[in-house]
Amino acid sequence: MRRFKFSLAPILSLKVAKEDAALRKFGEAVAFRAQTAELLKQANFCRQSHLDSIQHARALRLEAVHQQSWFDELNRLEAECSVCADGFAKAMGEERKAKNAYLKAHNESKALHNLKDKRVLQHNKTQEKANEKELEEIMLSRRNAL
């Protein structure tokens, strides 16, 4: 029986390597998004804590000089939250792009795997028919020899 050799094997191996690289990039994008989400969460927590402190200072009627410095710090924290939110949105976009690239690469390699499987089945059927025909010829030649 002849061995099956897939003529598109080099292309398949390239597609699989491309899929692996895309999966790795997707994993990195997910990790980066999680990291930026944590930074955003921490920045929002700091901003909220500082806001609570300002409200507490107002309740104690602290001097306006102290309150102004607290408001300046609050503005800085809000700007930091805004930067973190922008980073998070960018990370979400990168994750979406990486996911789409991975899905595309996966579908391409899956299509080639399916094609290979189909060709293997065709090859096996052809080989089985050839073997059956060869056996029939052997049986006929033995009958004719008797």
Image: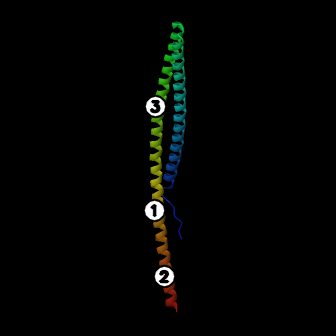
Q: Which residue is mark 2?
A: 136
Q: Position of residue 49 (x, y in %)?
A: 54, 22
Which image quadrant for residue 62? top right
| C-alpha separation, residue under disc 2 versus residue under disc 1 | 27 Å
The residue type indicated by label 1 comes to: Lys
Q: Which residue is mark 3?
A: 89
Q: Earlier in the sequence, mark 3 or mark 2?
A: 3
Q: Residue at x 51, y 41 (%)?
A: 26
> At 50% across and 59% down in the image, what residue appears?
6
Mark 3 packing: few (<14 Cα in 10 Å), some, or many (20+)?
Answer: some
Picture layout, residue 129 above or below residue 86: below
**Which of 25/7 is in front?**
25
Foreground tag (1 vs 3): 3
Q: Which amino acid type is shown beneath numbered disc 2?
A: Glu
Front residue of this view, candidates 79 and 112? 79
Residue 118 marker: 1
